[in-house]
């Protein structure tokens, strides 16, 4: 690893296209999109606090905090395993403290951890409703509060939320109202926090995939046939990288779609991200087919 990767957070003048030496605090980084974002940063020589609940192998979920850390280190980054439930304020505080003690600060917060249940109002138990709102809204709010004292010291601080553009179309709410309320809650958080933190130079943006992404949630809820029409998490990670390497004072309050961002960088062929070649990817929720 280059010497730059060991400099103190906030002091490194990395190139605009690099996360070398940057400290990322990523929730839900044991697998899926969170792990992919971590691995993309690791290839630059980034330093990642991996926040997750999975300490030991899970019968239905691939990967743990520890396997993610090993993958990050193999990719060229540094990793810190933080076993934490983002609903637990003390656990989040411990994780933030551990990241700062290990790496010297925090430059980037990625609020990725989430819960999903695509069920109607009648079929959504209150326990599931509470879980989605706790993980999808309260958790990002909590993590942001705890990271703010360190983000404000960074040379190019970013908060990235995984949530959709907040367009009010009734058909995007009905059928899975509780879930949509929680994800739109996070989008409104982006909207408000970006304006609130603009004077501090902290960027706050949202990112959402154009198509369904191959994650454990998709595999467990919809099965292997749906996976064939997915893209790999790497497309979201590559899009996140383009956001997190931009100047925070110049790029904030945006609601980004992964493919649109990558097209801006000159990419036109997305076939390499497809789980199965030749299968047309299925559009994700909250993506209007008339605009893509």
Image: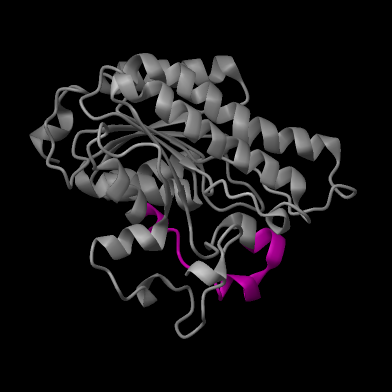
Measuring 24% from the left and 42% from the top, which residue is drawn there?
Answer: 246
| Prevailing SS of the magenta stretch | helix
Tell me which corner region of the image, top left, top right, bottom left or bottom right, holds residue 202: top left
Residue 152: x percent and y percent?
Answer: 30, 18
Measuring 27% from the left and 61% from the top, which residue is drawn there?
Answer: 264
Q: What is the span of residues highlighted in magenta in the rendered image?
A: 219-237
Depth order, front residue of 93/18: 18
Q: Which residue is the extreme one toward the bottom? A: 278
Please identify the quadrant where the N terminus is shown.
top left
Tell me which corner region of the image, top left, top right, bottom left or bottom right, holds residue 272: bottom left
Depth order, front residue of 250/136: 250
Residue 263: x percent and y percent?
Answer: 31, 65
Residue 223 within the segment the image draws in magenta:
yes
Measuring 18% from the left and 39% from the top, which residue is drawn there?
Answer: 20
| Left or right: residue 251 compared with residue 132 | left
Residue 28 within the segment the image draws in magenta:
no
Residue 168: x percent and y percent?
Answer: 64, 49
Q: How many marks?
A: 0
Q: Is residue 85 above or below residue 97?
A: below
| Left or right: residue 56 compared with residue 120 | left
The answer to whether any part of residue 3 appears in the image is yes
Q: Is residue 3 above or below residue 105?
A: below
Residue 130: x percent and y percent?
Answer: 76, 32
Measuring 25% from the left and 31% from the top, which residue is drawn there?
Answer: 249
Depth order, front residue of 45/139: 139
């Amino acid at each position: 690893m280059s010497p730059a990767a060991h400099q103190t957070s906030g002091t490194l003048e990395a190139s605009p296209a690099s996360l070398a030496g940057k400290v990322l605090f990523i929730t839900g980084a044991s697998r899926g999109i969170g792990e992919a974002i971590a691995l993309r940063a690791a290839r630059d020589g980034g330093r990642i606090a991996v926040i997750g609940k999975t300490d030991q192998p899970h019968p239905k979920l691939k990967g743990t905090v520890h396997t993610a850390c090993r993958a990050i280190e193999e990719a060229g980054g540094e990793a810190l395993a933080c076993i934490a439930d983002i609903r637990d304020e003390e656990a989040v505080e411990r994780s933030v403290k551990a990241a700062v003690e290990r790496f010297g600060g925090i430059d980037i917060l990625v609020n990725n951890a989430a819960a999903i249940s695509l069920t109607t109002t009648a079929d959504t138990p209150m326990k599931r409703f509470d879980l989605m709102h706790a993980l999808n809204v309260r958790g990002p709010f909590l993590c942001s509060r705890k990271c703010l004292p360190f983000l404000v010291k960074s040379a190019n601080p970013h908060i990235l939320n995984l949530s959709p553009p907040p367009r009010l179309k009734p058909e995007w709410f009905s059928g899975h109202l509780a879930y949509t309320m929680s994800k739109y809650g996070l989008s409104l958080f982006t909207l408000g926090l970006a304006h609130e933190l603009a004077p501090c130079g902290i960027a706050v943006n949202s990112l959402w995939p154009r198509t369904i992404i191959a994650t454990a949630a998709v595999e467990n809820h919809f099965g292997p046939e749906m996976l064939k029409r997915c893209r790999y998490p790497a497309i979201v990670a590559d899009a996140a990288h383009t956001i997190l390497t931009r100047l925070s004072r110049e790029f904030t309050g945006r609601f980004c779609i992964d493919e649109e961002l990558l097209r801006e960088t000159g990419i036109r062929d997305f076939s390499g991200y497809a789980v199965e070649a030749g299968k047309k990817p299925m559009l994700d929720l909250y993506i209007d087919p008339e605009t893509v």
